[in-house]
Image: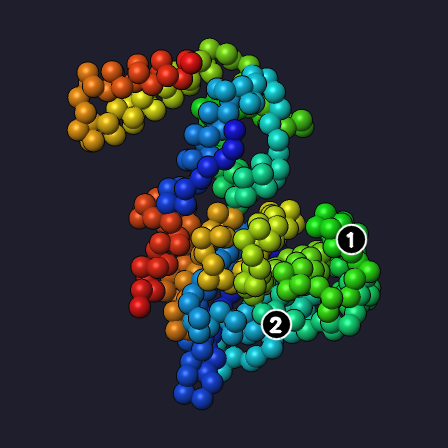
């Protein structure tokens, strides 16, 4: 097993004249929690979609454990998209059944125990839930797979600070040193303590890719203040 | 004793300081077993690898030791804990002193203020 879980070379995706992802070359080692950070329209979502074959690259390539995005890579990757694709008339227990049928690595026991801890009733239907609760349910589903790579697009975007703490706790509870989590967000202050590396994206390009402790050591700044500096308008 | 971390300094160094404090204050008494890396990382909400690095640093200084199968323990060497305590008091006192001098107080004034506050807190 190679030490690199995700690798891309000159990965590019253009929409008309705009390059949403522009010649991104990146190598992410296994056993890491990586923050994919950038302002709006910096290419975070497009990048994650390319990794999941929801988009195909205009140029360059991305490899997940050596595989191009496709059936093989999807067995290894658990993806939380920015928008929900779940049917809101379904009960949580029905969706758990669904995930169990779809993914051989899905651990329903894990899902039920996390739901219980967060006081979410599996018999409730998604549409009766608040947005925060729905986001928790989705993250629980995604984290209940025993995947090698978790790609989480804005896992804390729509929830209040207390719910954010819960979500971070779900992530830490499920983090296993052999797995890798890449999560995109612009809410850096809330999340930077659980990150080990960060990738800053700006207009589709990687501005830098560094260890967060190294940033603190060298600049004496938090990742959040460095971000504000790099992206000052 | 809660955990207080500032994101503008390396977290592992702050974790070392705070675990030292907890050992000195008896939150983790000599010879006691420390929670696992995972549990501690969740308690503090930090990356487990960062917590691992802090614990490795504390092992290096001898405050913690690992027993192969049963986990990580606080040293039973009470003398060592005492020495750390003395180091901490000097560090904190020095930092306080530097701050007060920057505010423009001289040593006498600082001592006077300190003894006044001590008297007040005795009541």
Q: Residue B21 location in percent, x, y? A: 46, 25
Q: In percent of the image, x 52 and y 79: which residue is there?
A: A57
Q: Residue A163 location in percent, x, y? A: 60, 53
Query: What's the coloring here?
Result: rainbow
Task: Say which quarter of the image contains residue A225.
Answer: bottom left
- Which residue extends farthest bottom? A16
Q: Residues within 10 Å of mark 2 (few under 14, many from 20)?
A: few
Q: Residue A13 location in percent, x, y? A: 48, 80
| Tag 1 subunit | A
Q: Is residue A226 above or below residue B120?
A: below
Residue A24 can be seen in this image? no
Determine whether the residue tagged by mark 1 lies in a helix, strand or loop. helix
Q: Residue A214 location in percent, x, y? A: 38, 47
On-image quarter of the C terminus of chain B: top left
Residue A19 can be seen in this image? yes
Q: Residues within 10 Å of mark 1 (few under 14, many from 20)?
A: many
- Residue at image mark 1: A112
Image check: A63 left or right of A99? left
Sequence order check: which comes first, mark 2 or mark 1? 2
- Residue at image mark 2: A83
Q: In percent of the image, x 44 and y 39: which residue is there?
A: B5
Q: Label 2 vs label 1: CA separation?
A: 23 Å
Q: In percent of the image, x 60 and y 76: which residue is there?
A: A53
Q: In percent of the image, x 57 and y 18: which residue is there?
A: B29
Q: Is residue B105 above or below residue A170?
A: above
| Tag 2 subunit | A
Image check: B87 left or right of A5? left
Image check: B37 left or right of A134? left
């Amino acid at each position: 097993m190679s030490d690199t879980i995700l690798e891309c070379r000159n990965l590019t995706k253009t929409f008309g004249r705009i390059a949403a992802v522009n010649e991104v070359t990146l190598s992410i080692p296994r056993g890491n929690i990586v923050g994919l950070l950038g302002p709006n329209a910096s290419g975070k979502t497009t990048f994650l979609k390319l990794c999941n074959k929801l988009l195909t690259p205009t140029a360059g390539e991305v490899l997940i454990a050596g595989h191009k995005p496709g059936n093989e890579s999807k067995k290894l990757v658990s993806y939380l998209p920015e928008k929900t694709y779940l049917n809101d008339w379904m009960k949580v227990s029905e969706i758990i059944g669904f995930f169990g049928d779809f993914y051989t690595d899905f651990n329903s026991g894990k899902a039920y125990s996390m739901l219980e801890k967060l006081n979410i009733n599996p018999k409730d239907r998604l549409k009766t839930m608040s947005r925060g609760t729905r986001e928790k349910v989705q993250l629980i589903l995604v984290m209940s797979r025993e995947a090698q790579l978790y790609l989480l697009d804005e896992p804390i975007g729509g929830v209040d600070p207390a719910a954010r703490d819960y979500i971070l706790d779900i992530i830490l509870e499920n983090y296993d040193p052999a797995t890798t989590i890449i999560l995109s967000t612009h809410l850096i202050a809330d999340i930077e303590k659980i990150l080990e590396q960060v990738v800053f994206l700006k207009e589709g390009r990687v501005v830098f890719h560094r260890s967060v402790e190294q940033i603190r050591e060298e600049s004496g700044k938090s990742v959040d203040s460095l971000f504000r500096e790099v992206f000052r308008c | 004793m809660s955990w207080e971390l500032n994101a503008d300094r390396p977290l592992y160094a702050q974790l070392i300081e705070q675990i030292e404090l907890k050992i000195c204050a008896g939150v983790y008494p000599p010879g006691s077993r420390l929670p696992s890396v995972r549990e501690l990382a969740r308690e503090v909400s930090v990356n487990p690898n960062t917590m691992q690095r802090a614990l490795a640093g504390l092992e290096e200084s001898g405050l913690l030791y690992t027993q192969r199968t049963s986990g990580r323990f606080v040293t039973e060497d009470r003398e060592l804990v005492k020495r750390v305590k003395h180091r901490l008091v000097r560090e904190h006192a020095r930092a306080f002193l530097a701050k007060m001098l920057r505010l423009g107080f001289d040593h006498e004034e600082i001592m006077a203020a300190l003894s006044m506050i001590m008297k007040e807190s005795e009541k």
